[in-house]
Amino acid sequence: MDNFSEDEENVTNILRGMENIYVDTTSISLVDGQEGKLYYRGINVAELVAHSTFEETSWLLLNGNLPTNSELTSFKLELKTLQHTHDKIFRIISEFPLSSSPLLLLQFCLSALSSLENADNYLGQTGMERFIKVIAQTPVIVSAAYRHSLGRPFLEPRSDLGFVENFMYMFSGNFPTKKQAKCLETALVLLMDHGFNTSTFAARTVASTGANLYAVISAAAGALSGPLHGGAGEHVIQLLAEVRQFNDVKKYVHDLLSSGGKIVGMGHRIYKTSDPRAEIFKDLLFRITPEGEKNSDYLLLCQIEQEARNYFRSREKPIYSNVDFWSGAVYKRLGILPTMYSSILAVARVVGWCAHILELSEDNRLYRPRSIYKGKINQPFIPLELRGF
Ligand code: COA
């Protein structure tokens, strides 16, 4: 027998891309793809964006409930106390080429921290401090990596600023206005968790093996870097530049889609209606775009969205703009360069990853799916000298 076949009759269906596969339960966030709603621990994110801070929302995701006043005060203090990272991390970053992506440097530095922090010695321990430490250090590392890419000196974190202001100060060197800080805080709150998205699933998969916290977060950061996931935002800025150069939105969109191309920042595996985060980002972009500004990113994105929606509607495809369609233009307004966009997502999503690791640790079982083998078996080993050139 040269071909091996799994017992395919017992395999009812292969769901490629794991579409519609349920692998576990979670009580961290609910992505309601039919209604276009997102909830963290049962609270609609729209409400959290309006009323909650980065720190409060992080506590909510990690602990399952909103913090009391004293809990919030000590959580903020812990974030400040634990934000200082090893000097070696700054040295590592400075050794890399200026062209290195801040997110991929984060992934590398997290692996390094695995050893610098003796993380394997804490295997199985779920004390909150280690989780707060990784959440607090992520903005410090990505800010240093971003400044390195710009050839600017690193800035130490400050303890007289809130989490978001401190993050903005560390990467830009400027103290943000209240409006700018609120803008980035909205983004961070919106991006903290999103069901079993690919990087969260990667985190849970690696965590299910019992790997240390830094190994888990590093794997999740790697998953986030792809253009189908966290890397989409920066490509939208490229799309805007291309459409401006082409100078005919309708034709650009139609040509791209009819030739089988994709509009980056549109479509979603779960949302079959509009992505609630996209709506909030769109509104935010509208509010921070000066009134009457001609040819603004906001107006151009609206036109691209409109043309693409017309195309999709005529083919009965439920494809809408997703969060990344709008987020990049918001960051651009804040003076942030595209190379940083996926790292901003990492600063937010690390909270969700930590919440998922904690949740999984309560009742873990190794994640280990199966595949149907389609190849040959019993093949002879041909010695190298007989294989030709
Ligand atoms: N532009 C054009 N067509 C799109 C599209 C897009 N942005 N997103 C999905 N489609 C189409 C596909 O071409 C495919 O059409 P077909 O059935 O005729 O072949 C169909 O919709 C299903 O697409 P698929 O890529 O299989 O869906 P998915 O659930 O696997 O993918 C994404 C989800 C997000 C990966 C996909 O929508 C995408 O690539 N979007 C662009 C990247 C992006 O914005 N990523 C950030 C996500 S938050």
Image (cartoon, grey):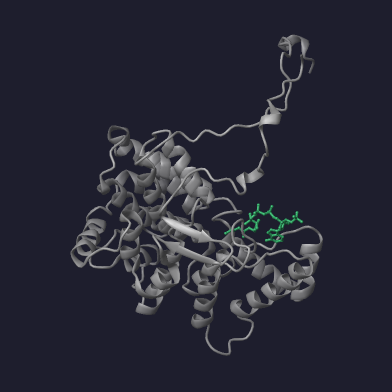
Looking at the image, can residue 194 be seen? yes
- Compared across the picture, whether 153 is left or right of 336 comes to left
Occupied quadrant, residue 158: bottom left
Q: Nearer the viewer, residue 28 or 357?
A: 28
Residue at image point 68% right, 27% down: 373
Instruction: Please say if 238 is above or below 279.
Output: above
Q: Position of residue 273 (x, y in %)?
A: 62, 67
Occupied quadrant, residue 306: bottom right
Quadrant location of the C terminus? top right
Looking at the image, can residue 150 be seen? no
Q: Nearer the viewer, residue 185 or 92?
A: 185
Quadrant location of the N terminus? top right
Occupied quadrant, residue 6: top right
Residue at image point 50% right, 57% down: 342
Quadrant of the image where one finds ligand 1: bottom right
- Compared across the picture, whether 124 is left or right of 223 comes to left
Q: Position of residue 292 (x, y in %)?
A: 58, 90
- Compared across the picture, whether 35 is left or right of 172 comes to right
Q: Nearer the viewer, residue 320 or 84?
A: 320
Residue at image point 33% right, 57% down: 64
Q: Position of residue 340 (x, y in %)?
A: 49, 60
